[in-house]
Image (tube, rainbow, N blue to C red):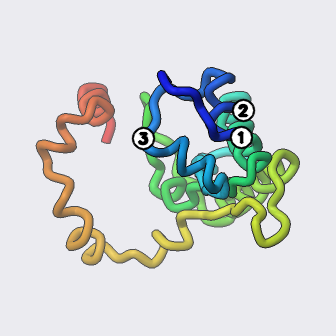
Amino acid sequence: MANPVTSELLRDFTERGLVHDVTAGLDQRLAADPAISAYIGFDPSADSLHVGHLMGVLALRRLQLHGGRPVALVGGGTGMIGDPSGRSAERNLLDRATLDHNRAAIGAQLANLVDFSGKSGALLLDNLSWLGDLGLIDFLRDTGKHLTVGYMLAKESVKTRLEGGLS
């Protein structure tokens, strides 16, 4: 960033080497009111966080220390589907009870690092709460029309999975 940073949050993240580029006006927006929200998604295929989550969790914590509201999104909906992002093999599909257990365990671990209490506390959300009732017809009508075969085949992750014989 060429200009001096006035926002404490953005300065903190920049000094830690966590900022590559920012939207125009973000620094001024944060300097005027640092109370923003940001989210990070967590895969509930296991009941524990791992070292790969550390940077994101620490970023949520730093955001909160600067007056922002962290949102921890546990992907119960994507966990039930078996989202294969970045994987070279099919993921085991988990039942609802296992996903609920994993979500609760991840939430408990996150509670040691970010504050979920009070009106401005962090939020722990599960995308199953809004994806669970989404029907196929509604999805295809509202969202599917934007996902053409060409668009999907252009994605490197889709190409890799097709070449490897994975669905």
Q: Residues within 10 Å of mark 2 (few under 14, many from 20)?
A: few
Residue picked out by circle 2:
54
Instruction: State which quadrant residue 165 falls in.
Output: top left
> Looking at the image, which residue sits at the far right?
112
Q: Is residue 4 visible to the viewer in this orientation of the structure? A: yes
Q: Amino acid at mark 3?
A: Thr
State the residue in front, 34 or 47: 34
- The percent position of residue 147, horizontal first and vertical second, equals 20, 54
- The percent position of residue 4, horizontal first and vertical second, equals 57, 27
Q: Amino acid at mark 1?
A: Val
Left/right placement of residue 45 relative to residue 112 reads left
- Distance between mark 2 and mark 1 Cα atoms: 5 Å
Q: Is residue 71 visible to the viewer in this orientation of the structure? A: no
Residue picked out by circle 3:
23
State the residue in front, 58 or 50: 58
At x 80%, y 61%, the residue is: 116
Left/right placement of residue 149 relative to residue 75 reads left
- The image shows residue 59, relative to residue 124, as above or below, that is above
- The percent position of residue 67, horizontal first and vertical second, equals 74, 53
Q: Earlier in the sequence, mark 2 or mark 3?
A: 3
Q: Residues within 10 Å of mark 1 (few under 14, many from 20)?
A: many
Q: Confirm or deny contact between disc 2 and disc 1 (CB under 8 A).
A: yes
Left/right placement of residue 164 relative to residue 110 reads left
Give the structural element (helix, strand or loop) at label 2. helix
